[in-house]
C-alpha cells in the first residue's frame, strides 16, 4: 500500500528504485538479528547496489541542488522507503514461516518450494481479507468496478502471485540479503519501463546509476 501510494507523489522509476534500498536494511537487520552474514564480496556488491540507487536518485529533476539531492526525502520518497523497510521485516518473517512449516511437515520435502507455496497461500488470503474490509470501509464503490476492470486485475494478480512465489522460495533457500540484492534488477527494468512506457524522460540521466547497480548485482552473484 505504501509503494502504490508513493506512485502518486513520485515517478514510477524513483519509487521503485528508492524502495529497493531495502537491500541495506536487509543486510543490517540480517546481521544484527538473524545471524545472516554475507561474504566480503557480497557486502561490496550490496554497497555498490546502494550507491547505484543513490546515483539514480541524484539524477532527479526536483529537490535541492548538489549532492544533497541523492538523499532528498519528500513524501513520495518517504513512502517508498517505508515500503522497503516493511518489506524487509516481512521477508524475514516469511523465511521463518517457511522454515517452521518445512520442519513441522517433513512430507513437504527439502526443496522448500511447497513450504513457500503454503506460506504464500496463507499470506494471500490474509491480505485479501484485510484489503477487502479496508475498501468496504473507505471506498465501497471501488468494489463495483471489478466487473469493468476484472480482466486487467486478474492479469496483475497472476503476475504478482508468481512474482511473490519466486520471492518466497528464494528467501527459504538462501540469505535474504542476497535475494534482495539480486532483486535490484527490478530497479533497472522499472527505470527502462518508466522511460519507454510512461515517458519519464529524466530517467536518461539515471543510466550511470543503473550501470553501477548492475555491477553490484554481479558482485553479489559472485559472492
Image (cartoon, rainbow, N blue to C red):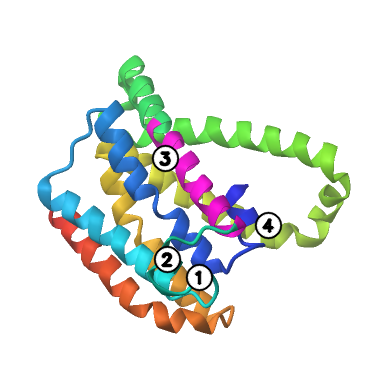
Question: Mark 1 sits on what residue?
Answer: 64
The residue labelled by disc 3 is 88
Indicate which disc, 1 or 3, sits on the residue closer to the N terminus.
1
Q: CA distance from mark 1 to mark 2?
A: 6 Å
Please say whether residue 176 is visible from this viewpoint.
Answer: no
At numbered mark 2, what does the secondary structure look like: helix, strand or loop?
helix
Discs 1/3, front: 1
Q: Quadrant of residue 56?
A: bottom left
Residue sitting nearer the eye, 52 or 133: 52
Q: Is residue 182 above or below residue 38?
A: below
Q: Please state the extent of the stretch shown in magenta in the rendering.
A: 75-92
Q: Are marks 1 and 2 in contact (CB under 8 Å)?
A: yes
Identify the element where label 4 is drawn: helix
Q: Which numbered disc, 1 or 4, marks the residue closer to the eye?
A: 1
Q: Which residue is mark 2?
A: 68
What whole-number distance in Å separates the C-alpha atoms at marks 1 and 3? Answer: 29 Å
**Separation (CA) of disc 1 from disc 4:** 38 Å
**What percent of the width, then of the height, locates residue 165?**
43, 44
- Separation of marks 4 and 3 at Cα, in angstroms: 26 Å
Tell me which numbered mark, 1 or 4, is placed earlier along the sequence.
1
* Number of dots carrying numbers: 4
Mark nearest the camera among 2 and 3 is 2
* Residue at 35 percent of width and 69 percent of height: 55
For label 1, the SS is loop
What secondary structure is marked by label 3? helix
Within-10-Å neighbours for mark 3: few <14, some 14–19, many 20+? many
Answer left or right for 41 relative to 156.
Answer: left
Q: Residues within 10 Å of mark 4 (few under 14, many from 20)?
A: few
Left or right, 118 with respect to 50, comes to right
Q: Are marks 4 and 3 in contact (CB under 8 Å)?
A: no
Residue 153, disc:
4
Q: Does residue 213 appear in this view?
A: yes
Amino acid at each position: 500500500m505504501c509503494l502504490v501510494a508513493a506512485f502518486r507523489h513520485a515517478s514510477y522509476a524513483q519509487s521503485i528504485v528508492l524502495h529497493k534500498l531495502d537491500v541495506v536494511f536487509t543486510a543490517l537487520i540480517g546481521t544484527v538479528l538473524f545471524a545472516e552474514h554475507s561474504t566480503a564480496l557480497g557486502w561490496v556488491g550490496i554497497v555498490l547496489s546502494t550507491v547505484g540507487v543513490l546515483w539514480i536518485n541524484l539524477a532527479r529533476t526536483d529537490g535541492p541542488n548538489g549532492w544533497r539531492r541523492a538523499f532528498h526525502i519528500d513524501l513520495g520518497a518517504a513512502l517508498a522507503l517505508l515500503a522497503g523497510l516493511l518489506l524487509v521485516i516481512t521477508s524475514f518473517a516469511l523465511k521463518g514461516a517457511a522454515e517452521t512449516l518445512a520442519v513441522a511437515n517433513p512430507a513437504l520435502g527439502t526443496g522448500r518450494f511447497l513450504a513457500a507455496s503454503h506460506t504464500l497461500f496463507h499470506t494471500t488470503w490474509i491480505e485479501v481479507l484485510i484489503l477487502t474490509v479496508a475498501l468496504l470501509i473507505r471506498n465501497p464503490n471501488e468494489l463495483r468496478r471489478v466487473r469493468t476492470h476484472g480482466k486487467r486485475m486478474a492479469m496483475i494478480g497472476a503476475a504478482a502471485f508468481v512474482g511473490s512465489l519466486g520471492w518466497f522460495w528464494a528467501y527459504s533457500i538462501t540469505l535474504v540479503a542476497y535475494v534482495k540484492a539480486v532483486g535490484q534488477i527490478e530497479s533497472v527494468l522499472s527505470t527502462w519501463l518508466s522511460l519507454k512506457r510512461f515517458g519519464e524522460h529524466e530517467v536518461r540521466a539515471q543510466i550511470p546509476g543503473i550501470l553501477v547497480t548492475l555491477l553490484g548485482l554481479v558482485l553479489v552473484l559472485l559472492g
